[in-house]
Amino acid sequence: MTPYPVLDDLGLVLITAAGVVIASRSLRIPPILAYMVAGLALGPLTGALAVSPSLDLFAELGVALLLFIVGLELSLAKIRAFGATALIAGCIQVAVTFALGAAVAGLLGFSTSAAVIAGLVAAFSSTAVVVKLLDRAGGLDSTHGRLSIGILLVQDVLVVVVLTTLGGIGSGAEGGAGAGLMGLALALLAMGGLIVAGAAAGRWLLPGFVRWMGPAPEGLFIVGLTWAFGFILAAEAFHLSVELGAFIAGVILAQVPDTEALRRRTHPLVDFFLAVFFVSLGARLDAGVMAATWPAAIALAAFVLVVKPLVIVVILGLLGQTPRNAFLTGLTLGQISEFAFILAALATAAGLVGPDFFGLVGLAGLITIGVSTVLVPNGPALVELLDRRGLLARLPGAAGEEAPAAPGLERHVVIIGMNTLGKMLVSRFRELGEEVLAVDTDTRKLEGLPARTLSGDVTQPSVFEEAGVERALLVVSTLQIEDVNSLVAFRCRRLGVPVSIHAFDPSLIDELLEIGADHLMVSKHDGIRLVEDGLRRLGVIG
């Protein structure tokens, strides 16, 4: 035992979570579900973990940083990309699912306020679960994948409004209805003030600062987190939810160019805090409460798994989507959101629901997330089964086939380092008719190049993945950084992708060849022609 109980709790949470994730890997269970199972093992099943205020803080930070990441994805370009269909479908789906869910909960005997909260819980789907499942199934670039992400982004904006409303009501709950309305008005006013102040900073302060910090990704990461926590603290000072503050910070920062590196570097930190959140969520569930509320939890889960997808199918069909796309999108969004647990906690704190409501929502969430992990990867097979039985044609929607996925990078040349040699190689490969991706940590060096560009640090695995290195025709590093060049050569060798490295120091030649470099540029003075000849001998270019 350490003198700091929170360290004992964190150690227990992380060790158990890691054990369950490793054990469940062969079953292809997503980490989120594994974390909740770990929480059940630590809480209701063994009583080994009692969720402390310190652990609660880590869990809340996880959700706040998740909303920061969601906000970072909401650039104006992406908002336009998911278009009117996702916007209309998302708004109508939330409204209809909320109304139906509240009505069903009322018929099941819920109080009016509990029925309203149950409707809200049912209306929102899990961004974290859906993105991970689509990524695993390779469906992020499919039509139904893009529709699902678009609808989720609309839901995320709406859930922030709901969180703000509940927070405002909760802050004034002790003074009655008048105080509650005043609390809500003050919360909305404070939210407007944060948005205006942040937008001003985003317009006149952040762009130049981010560009200046671009060549130092570690510094940009710290600056980004400072920006996020500044809004989190401001939200707390104005009695708003910290999740709202993080979301506003992310949205404002998303409008600033060249923040891709920040998004990539923040994801691992978010994953850590989210692991704590989902484990603590499972640990909070009380065995007695689950035993008493399981019929209502199953009813809520059934509504989310069956009725909500049908609502989405009908809406998308009426908006002109094919039955296939509508069905797969509805299936993908058939689970309870991680934000449902925050809604339940806020509603409990505001006295809108009883203390058992959180356990009910937790059990329903566990059921729906678990079922989604099975259904979503098998969605295409289910569509084919429905089609063979003639059921797919009975769904509303336009006739036609699914639009092809957006073209990704494939059989392209990745050139790392936009120094003089790198830029010359970009131009030469483009002249040869090759698709080129130029990579550098400094966004200023990427400007004006006749190729696709990616700002990032290639020592980060996420940058390698985003660059599509495993599908590349060739990777070239023109850097004069020994460790980075060695790492690039090693990773390309493991992926089976030809790699050419700038051996700026002759003493590095043997080491690079031993690691697996296919071609070496001994000096930039070799000239482009000699490099081209070497790559032609390798059969990389014609």
Image: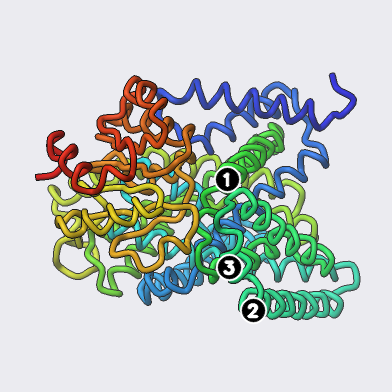
Specify whether 143 is left or right of 269: left
Specify whether 28 is left or right of 141: right
The N terminus appears in which quarter of the rendering? top right
Residue 204, numbered label: 2
Q: Position of residue 87 (x, y in %)?
A: 43, 73
User: Element at badge 3?
Assistant: helix
The amino acid marked with disc number 1 is: Ala
Q: Vertical placement of 370 versus 349: above or below?
A: above
Q: Are marks 1 and 3 in contact (CB under 8 Å)?
A: no
Query: How packed is label 2: few (under 14 Cα within 10 Å), some, or many (20 or more)?
Result: few
Q: Are marks 2 and 1 in contact (CB under 8 Å)?
A: no
Q: CA distance from mark 3 to mark 2?
A: 16 Å
The amino acid marked with disc number 2 is: Trp
Q: Vertical placement of 203 versus 138: above or below?
A: below
Q: Residue at x 32, y 35 (%)?
A: 522
The amino acid marked with disc number 3 is: Val
Q: Quadrant of residue 115?
A: bottom right
Residue 516 in sight in this render: yes
Query: How packed is label 3: few (under 14 Cα within 10 Å), some, or many (20 or more)?
Result: many
Q: Quadrant of residue 118?
A: bottom right
Q: Which residue is mark 3?
A: 251
Q: Which residue is mark 1?
A: 297
Q: Earlier in the sequence, mark 2 or mark 1?
A: 2
User: Element at badge 1?
Assistant: helix
Q: Earlier in the sequence, mark 3 or mark 2?
A: 2
Q: Residue at x 69, y 37 (%)?
A: 280
User: Element at badge 2?
Assistant: helix
Q: Residue at x 20, y 42 (%)?
A: 530
Depth order, front residue of 427/493: 427
Residue 306 in sight in this render: no
Q: Residue at x 44, y 52 (%)?
A: 440
